[in-house]
Image: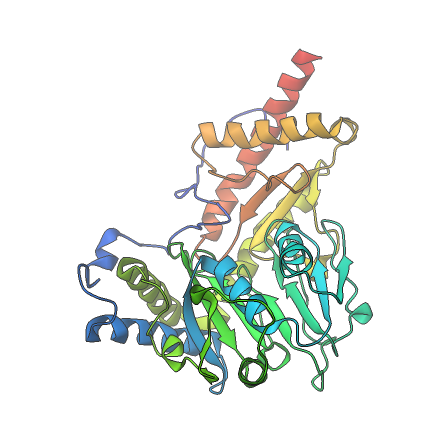
Amino acid sequence: MTGTTAPAARPANPRFSSGPCAKRPGWTLDALSDAPLGRSHRAKVGKTKLAQAIEDTRTVLGVPADYRIGIVPGSDTGAVEMAMWSLLGERPVDMLAWESFGAGWVTDAVKQLKLSDARVLEAPYGEIVDFATVDFDRDVVFTWNGTTSGVRVPNGDAIPADRKGLTICDATSAAFAQDLPYDKLDVVTFSWQKVLGGEGAHGVLILSPRAVERLLTYKPAWPLPKIFRLTSGGKLIEGIFKGETINTPSMLCVEDYLDALGWAKSIGGLDALKARADKNLAVIARFVEANDWIGFLAKSADIRSNTSVCLQFTAPEIVGLSKDEQDAFAKGVASKLEKEGVALDIGAYRDAPPGLRIWAGATVEASDLEALMPWIAHAYEAQKATLAQAA
């Protein structure tokens, strides 16, 4: 494929951003018409909708009945930091990082909380930490799916059932697209803006009975801001997990999340969502297999994300460029695709190696990805021509 002629077909929806992500197929503003705007979230209608969002989350994800689910402020970041500030410090911790957000949690543990016994295990972009080196008698904090690196944990087999520590998992680009073994995870967090294409600003915090026990028996040495508090008077603030959300949630965003959950249920739930993401990844994989100038950042297929798919340009003439030149080349390709209106916001994350990042979660249609692939080849060839002219 030379990509020298502009393809005839175009994606019907060019939104391939990794967050906020594309809305569900067929979404319109009419989906929000039942939002109780101008009403208190503490009124019966508000609490009912928040409680429904929690229960629909449990249903679609298959969260065990004895796990608590809470809607919290600050998106996934708020949910992760709530867990870290409230739970860490009782025992040593292993901090795992293989991309920028995991590295951010390392910074929180080491430089903000200043934990005295925090062991940092890192892997470069495109790889994950060897879980055989992780000590699960310590607390462990990690991302399940590296949104900025395109890698994921393949399964939870390495996490022992009889672990002594808690496992705190940032699952924001994995939830609703990948299998999460809840029996191996004590804290799971995500945001609405990822796989279901919801609006931003709100996070979900899922706690196992072991995590709740830690909350009730351990008091951190540092002060907790009100927005992070999960207990009061030595008891769990149960309202958080029944729709009495900390801070003031947007009922417009809640309505949008309910709509997305309803769509998920209507197509077959979690299995259908995973199948859509897997089908989307397969479209990109076939394109990569057919073209030797592009490759996955995640070299190993078993750890390859089916949501945030990260690609690199692998042709020798591109690899031989300086880091800044490679970055400029990749940005040029992304810019050409955006100017054509066929792919919006697919440049690699700022801290990641130069390349493209294409969201392939369940709200994206495989037909749109099929239409996009020839355009990537076209933009690549155009950018190569621009590079040759500048030489």
Judge whether 303 appears above or below 86 on screen.
above
| Image-based side of 180 in relation to 56, left or right | right
Which quarter of the figure has residue 80? bottom right
Image x and y of residue 26, in percent: 31, 54
Image x and y of residue 143, in percent: 63, 62
Which quarter of the figure has residue 13? top left
Which image quadrant: the N terminus?
top right
* Most distant residue in the right direction: 133
Which image quadrant: the C terminus?
top right
Residue drawn at x 70%, y 27% is 324
Residue drawn at x 40%, y 78% is 241
The one of 170 and 275 positioned closer to us in this rendering = 170
Judge whether 55 appears above or below 310 on screen.
below
| Image-based side of 285 in relation to 75, left or right | right
| Image-based side of 17 in relation to 87, left or right | left
The one of 322 and 262 positioned closer to us in this rendering = 322
* Most distant residue in the left direction: 38
